[in-house]
Image (cartoon, rainbow, N blue to C red):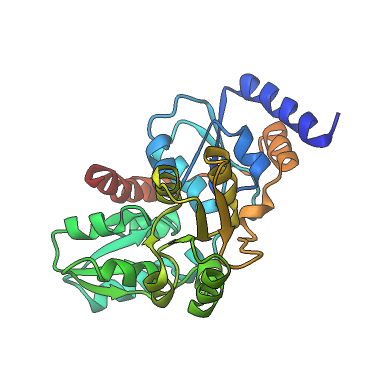
Amino acid sequence: MNSFKQSEEGIAKLKKELNAIIVAHNYQRPEVQDIADFTGDSLELARKSVGIEAEVIVFCGVRFMAETAAILNPSAMVLLSHLEAGCPMADMIDVGKLRKWKQDYPEAAVVAYVNTTAAVKAESDFCCTSANGVEVVNAVPNDEVLFVPDRNLGHYVSTKTAKKMIVYPGFCYVHDRITAEQVKLAKQRYPQAKVLVHPECRPDVIDMADAALSTSQILRYAKQSSDKTFLIGTEEGILHPLRKQSPEKEFYTITPDFVCADMKKTTLEMVLETMQTRRNVVTVPEEVRIRAKQAIDRMLAIT
């Protein structure tokens, strides 16, 4: 019996013993996605985390995602599959920086991308994801919006709203490294391909794409499209569900080795060990949780 099979069987057994549910982001390793009860992008995972009836939630993703599950399910034990799986972009802003920014723009509402810590969410008025950023910003009653922390997503949203956007200069190192020249070269290799990129990409890359979409939106677009070849501008983990749902189509990343190191820290063996030891428990202080939940709830009410 191979190690994957042994881990899968051990995980299945522990799921029953712990009354657990396993959640995985679309960027996780293929074998990790395959053992999850549900997968998705940040918005889908937030929606599905509401009212989970399980004693234990095993989150295969990065810390801010597990924090969101803990915010929405205070009675459950939330286990992060790898304790050191973080998000460099989320770490680019902290409460002190955000409070200073709020003092500088007292009339503005704060919209925090879900790729932020629970503490930053608690200092914000609304949360958003890459799937609903435009919708959330347009629903904000204020004329001015402080958008944190992703400058590229913020710029993308700013092109689709009349709001005055003040955008924090953070970025995702994975998406930000794609260049327009790389898109051009990829289109030369696959001239018939539709180009689908994530809105965390640079503005000039988005300008060259057929659509800027969240990972779940990319999945829906590719499934519904009559096109057969696609160039994908987001973390390579998305190729697995794309190829599963549309095996007759071809999918390629714009650049090779398009990998988020933190998303790839989780392995099946790590999931099994985390469940066995009940370690990597993610908790959010109640005062922070209540305030962060308000920002998330406002987002979910809009979408």
Q: How far from the left and from the top, in percent, is residue 26?
A: 53, 47
Q: How far from the left and from the top, in percent, is residue 280?
A: 63, 44
Q: Could you tell me which quadrant the C terminus lies in?
A: top left
Query: How many discs mark residues in the rendered view?
Result: 0
In terms of depth relative to the viewer, which is nearer, 4 or 53? Answer: 4
Q: Residue at point 72% right, 30% down?
A: 8
In terms of depth relative to the viewer, which is nearer, 165 or 26? Answer: 26
Left or right of 33 on screen, residue 126: left
Left or right of 26 on screen, residue 289: left
Q: Could you tell me which quadrant the N terminus lies in?
A: top right
- Residue 27 in view (yes/no): no
Q: Residue at point 16% right, 69% down?
A: 162
Q: Is residue 191 above or below residue 262?
A: below
- Quadrant assignment, res 185: bottom right
Left or right of 243 on screen, residue 67: left
Q: How far from the left and from the top, in percent, is residue 209?
A: 41, 67
Q: Residue at point 32% right, 74% down?
A: 167
- Quadrant assignment, res 35: top right
Q: Residue furthest right?
A: 1
Q: How far from the left and from the top, in percent, is residue 68?
A: 44, 46
- Residue 256 in view (yes/no): yes
Q: Residue at point 40% right, 64% down?
A: 199
Q: Is residue 110 above or below residue 100?
A: above
In terms of depth relative to the viewer, which is nearer, 58 or 45? Answer: 45
